Image: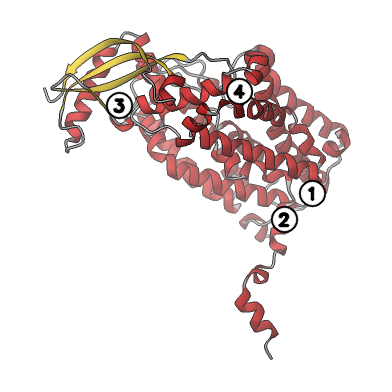
Amino acid sequence: MSRRSRSLVIVSVIAALFLPVLANRDSFPISTYPMYAGTRGTEVSFVTAQGIDADGSVVPLSLATIGASDDPLVVAGELRDVVRLDQADSRCRVIAGRLGARGGDDFADVEAVELVTERHDTVASLRGEDSLRDRTVHARCGVGG
Amino acid sequence: MWSRLVDSTAPAERVAAFRMCVGVFVLLYLAIRVPVFWDLATRSGTTFDGVGLFGWRDTPLPVSMIRTTVVVAFVSGVGMTIGYRFRATAPVFALAMLLLTTYRSSWGQLLHFENLFTLHLVLLAVSPAADAWSLDARRGTIARREATTYGLVMQVACVMVVVTYVIAGIAKLRIGGAEWMFGDTLRNHISYSAVRLELLGGDGSPLAGVVVRNAWILPPMAIGSVIVELSAPIALLGGRWRNGWVAAAWFMHLAIYALMLVGFPYPLFLIAFTPFFPLERVRDIDLRRWLPVQRQSAHSP
C-alpha cells in the first residue's frame, strides 16, 4: 500500500469519526459522546416504580423488578418513554405482575405499585437532607390481582 | 506526528495480538451480557427507536433474528479470535456485534461504552489480523505483507481511541462550556447518578456522598478530565507521552466508576489502549523471572 493510500485511510477514518460532531447528531457506533457533557442543576425529575405497603409507605423495588434488567440506564430510559407515550398503566401492571410472580419475603408487605415521577434535590439527598420536592403518580395498580 | 501515523511499521504478530485481545474481551463481554442481548428479542416494541444501522426502522426485529445473531456472534467470535477462516469469521463477528450493540442502543438510550470495541472489531474485520498467531497462518498459506500495512492497522486503531476521547472532550466544552469545568456540573452529575440508582432499587457509590460533601475537589477533577480527553493525541507520540496519557485516561475511568458506578469496561480493563503498545513482545516475557521457586532451583547444583 502506497504512502498516499495510507494517508487517505487515516484521513478518512478521522473524518468519519468527526462526522456526527459536524452534523451534531449522536448515533452508534460513531457518536458525539454527549454523556454527562451537559450542565445539570441540583433538582432533577426521575421516573421510577415504587411499592406501597398497607400503611401507605413507599417500599423501594429492585432494578430487576422495575425493569427486568441489571442496567439502570436502560431501565431509566424505558420508564421515561413509558410516561412520554402514556403507557404508565400497562407498565405498572407488568411490574406488579413481576412482583407477584417472584413471591418471597422481600416485598411481602407491598400491596400496590405506583409508577411515579419524583423531583429530588440530588445534592441534598447525598448530604442526608430531605430531598423530595415533588411527586406525581402516573399509575397505581394492585399486587396479586 | 503525521509521519509517525502514516509511515509506522509493525510486525504481523502485533496485529495478531491485538486481534486476540479484542476477541477475548468481546467474547467475555458477550458471555456476561448475553441475558441482556437475549432479552432484547422480547422487549416491547413501543419504546423502540432505531439508531445507526436501524435508523430506518420503527419496529423491532423478529425474535429469531436477534437470538440467531447472538449465537452467530459467539461462534464467529471464537473463529475470529483464534484466527480460523479469518476472512469469513472476522467480518461476520464484527457485523453480528455491530447489529447487537446498535440494536441495544435502539431503545431510547444510546449506550456509549460499546462504541470503541465495535469500531475496533470493524477495523480488524478488514485487516490482515490473522497473518500470524492464527490457525490460518499455521496452515502456511498466508503471505506476509509489508510492515507498513500492519503498522497502518495499529495506527488506525490508535486514531479511533484518540478521536473518541477528543470528541468526548469537545462535547463537554461545546455542550457544557466553562461551567462544566469551573461550576458545580460534575458534583451535580455525581449526585444525579447516585440518586437515580437509589430510586431504581440500587445503591449509589459510597464515595459519591463523600465528594459531594467535599465539593472543592471536583472542579480540579473536571478540568483534569477535559485535559485528559483533549490531550489524547499526545498518546500517538509514543514513549513516556503515551504511557502518561494511558495512565491518566485509565485513572479517569477508575474515578468515574468509583464516584458514579458508571463503568466503561473496554478502557477499564485496558484493552482499549492495547494498540498503543508493542503487544507482540508479550511472547518474550520470561514468566520464570517472577517465580522464586524456579529461580532458586536454577542456582542449585
Pointer 1 or 2: first along the chain: 1
Q: Which residue is mark 2?
A: B280
Determine whether label 3 and label 1 are within 8 Å by CB: no
Residue B102, position as x, y percentages in the image: 51, 27
Task: Give the chain of mark 2.
Answer: B
Q: Which mark is residue A66?
A: 3
Query: Mark 1 to mark 2: distance in Å?
Result: 9 Å
Query: Looking at the picture, which amino acid does disc 2 mark?
Result: Glu
Marks 4 and 3, how far apart at CA: 27 Å
Q: CA distance from mark 4 to mark 1?
A: 31 Å
- The subunit letter for the residue under badge 1 reads B
- Residue B253 versus residue A4: which sits nearer the camera? B253
Residue B155, quarter of picture? top right
Task: Tell me residue B203's x, y (percent).
Answer: 38, 33
What amino acid is labelled 3 in the image? Ile
- Label 4 sits on residue: A33
Q: Amino acid at mark 1?
A: Ala
Of B32 and B61, nearer the camera is B32
Say whether mark 2 and mark 1 are on the same chain: yes
In the image, residue B96 lies at what x, y percent? 51, 35
The answer to whether tags 3 and 1 share a subunit is no
Query: Do the dots labelled 4 and 1 sit on one chain?
Result: no
Chain of the residue that carries numbered disc 4 in the rendered image: A
Question: Of all residues shown, which one is farthest toward the left?
Answer: A145
Q: Which residue is mark 1?
A: B10
**Dot 3: chain letter:** A
Q: Secondary structure at mark 4?
A: loop
